[in-house]
Amino acid sequence: MMTSAQMRAARALLGIDQKRLAELSGLSVPTIQRMEASDGNVRGVVESLTRVVEALEAAGIELIGEGAASASGGRGVRLKSGPTS
């Protein structure tokens, strides 16, 4: 699963806008907008979600699941769980 925050962060790391992600994944801009507007996990058609994940991975993004270790030594950002004071 991918969260909407991960999707927005991935775009930011790549320096691309919603239009470019739509082009890379073969989806429409409104579809990308709906996915990013989801609360928590991205909601949508499984095929569309798969296309976005594949496009992000092909562009160099590694999506890290909750509690999972990163498979490579590349730079990245991870959201801590719990309060951040």
Image (cartoon, grey):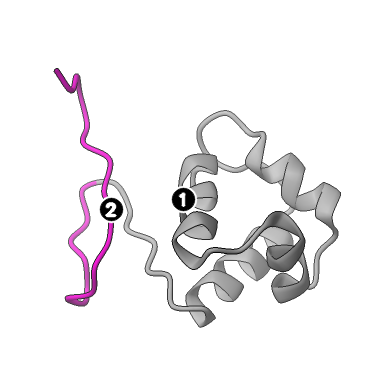
The quadrant in which residue 33 appears is: top right
Identify the residue at horizontal 70%, vertical 75% (top origin). 24
The residue furthest front is: 15
Tag 2 secondary structure = loop
User: Could you tell me how far apart the alpha carbons at marks 1 and 2 are, in whole angstroms?
Assistant: 9 Å
Q: Position of residue 55 (x, y in %)?
A: 60, 74
- Picture layout, residue 42 above or below residue 26: above
Residue 40 is a magenta residue? no
Tag 1 secondary structure = helix
Instruction: Give left or right: position of 81 versus 31.
Output: left
Compare residues 13 and 59 and report the one nearer the observer. 13
Identify the residue at horizontal 57%, vertical 74% (top origin). 54
Residue 77: assigned label = 2
- Residue flagged by tag 1: what amino acid is it? Ala
Residue 21: assigned label = none
Q: Position of residue 37 (x, y in %)?
A: 67, 34
Q: Position of residue 76 (x, y in %)?
A: 27, 61
Q: Earlier in the sequence, mark 1 or mark 2?
A: 1
User: What residue would you read off at disc 1?
Assistant: 9
- Residue flagged by tag 2: what amino acid is it? Val
Instruction: Give left or right: position of 5 versus 47.
Output: left
- Range covered by the magenta-colored residues: 67-85
The quadrant in which residue 49 appears is: bottom right
The quadrant in which residue 4 appears is: top right
- Magenta segment's dominant SS is loop
CB under 8 Å between discs 1 and 2: yes
Residue 83 is a magenta residue? yes
